[in-house]
Amino acid sequence: MDHGDRPDQPTEGLAHWPTDAVRDVKPIACHSHNDYWRPVPLYSAIQAGCTSVEADVWLFDNELYVGHTTSSLTAGRTLRSLYIQPLLELLTFKNETNSLHGRPTSVPGVFDTDPSQTLVLLIDFKTSGVALWPELVVQLLPLRERGYLTYFDGTTVVERLITIVASGDAPFDLILANQSYRDIFYDAPLDRLSDLSQKWPNPNRVPEEDKAARNALSFSSPVAGLRPAGNPTQEDGSTAGSANTAMSTAPFKDGFTSQNSYFGSTSFHRNVGPVWGSRLSQRQLQILRAQIRGAHERGLKVRYWDLPYWPVGFRNHIWHILIREGADVLSVDDLPGATRTDWRRRRGWWR
């Protein structure tokens, strides 16, 4: 799968992926940060089991280019070529294969082991959101027409195979503009969602009767507790649409609910601050707990970025704390380190 000499066709020759490369992959709640830097964008993350990928997008001359900086942009690396078209081909191929096998089911998702699991495509707006927005809406049309996109129908959110989340300079007002239908959701500012109504206790200090049930959970991934919860699959194999809970649709002064937003995200370094030694201070823990609680009250998933990455043992320790405190997805650069090794055993400054 060497595509170094085919920069204009970064995902050519991957027809075997749906049946081979992800056949036994179980979805894990990890977010592929700067996914376009992977050996094969999108597919490397899917093969690792990540349920969320990130693309930095720039609008120039009516085209959406993907890259970290303007100097890294090339003609062949666009949102269409790296993400939209590969997703379209992948899901269409899986659907056609399913039909050939005589299975009367709805369209399966990207993960064979959990066909109902949605894949998040987080699009980080790097240029003017007002200008970029209409082009994004148009480019998502093929996925929209085939019913692959999670959407809000004016009453509830129906989760589908692909969930689009807009971040960066994305215009929240344009997301809100259509009150009867939307299929692009906002990456809400987590630092503005804090529930400061009380001092929050350690969420892992649960009653004794709950411990047995929690300990009985078994995950094949080392990212313990981060197995994403997708919609239940019906007896006929179809995916049930999920209505948000009353808690997630309650009015909040900031306007962020699960009807218009998906993630609550913020910089760990900027909002929680540097970690000295091996422990977060009580003040830092309260910041985490208030933010996580506030996001969950709105039905949003918590994602911290700008995490420590070195030493590896210290990074693993921070991952462990985030999971323990209730973060819903780990933002990672090291996919093998997060998904293929038991990093819970390697924690501490000395390793």
Image (cartoon, rainbow, N blue to C red):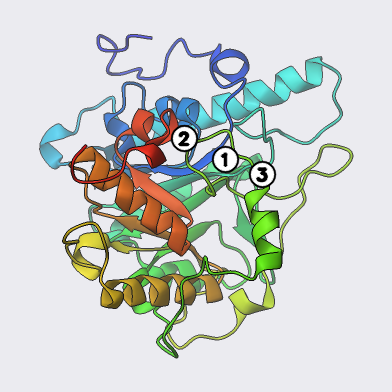
For marks 1 and 2 on the same chain, the one whose residue lies earlier in the sequence: 2
Query: What label sits on residue 84 in the rendered view?
Result: 2
Could you tell me the amino acid type at mark 2? Ile
Distance CA(mark 1)–CA(mark 3): 7 Å
Q: Residue at x 78, y 43 (%)?
A: 233
Task: Name the foreground residue: 205 vs 320.
Answer: 205
Could you tell me the amino acid type at mark 1? Leu
Circle 1 is placed at which residue position? 143
Q: Residues within 10 Å of mark 1 (few under 14, many from 20)?
A: some
Q: On screen, 213 above or below 250?
A: above
Q: Is residue 263 visible to the viewer in this orientation of the structure?
A: no
Q: Secondary structure at mark 1?
A: helix
Q: Is residue 317 left or right of residue 142?
A: left
Q: Position of residue 149 (x, y in %)?
A: 59, 47
Could you tell me the amino acid type at mark 3? Gly
Task: Name the foreground residue: 195 vs 174.
Answer: 195
Q: On screen, 169 above or below 194?
A: above
Circle 3 is placed at which residue position? 147
Q: Position of residue 239 (x, y in %)?
A: 76, 45
Q: Residue at x 19, y 45 (%)?
A: 349
Q: Are marks 1 and 2 in contact (CB under 8 Å)?
A: yes
Distance CA(mark 3)–CA(mark 2): 14 Å
Q: Residue at x 71, y 26 (%)?
A: 95
Quarter of the figure with residue 264: bottom left
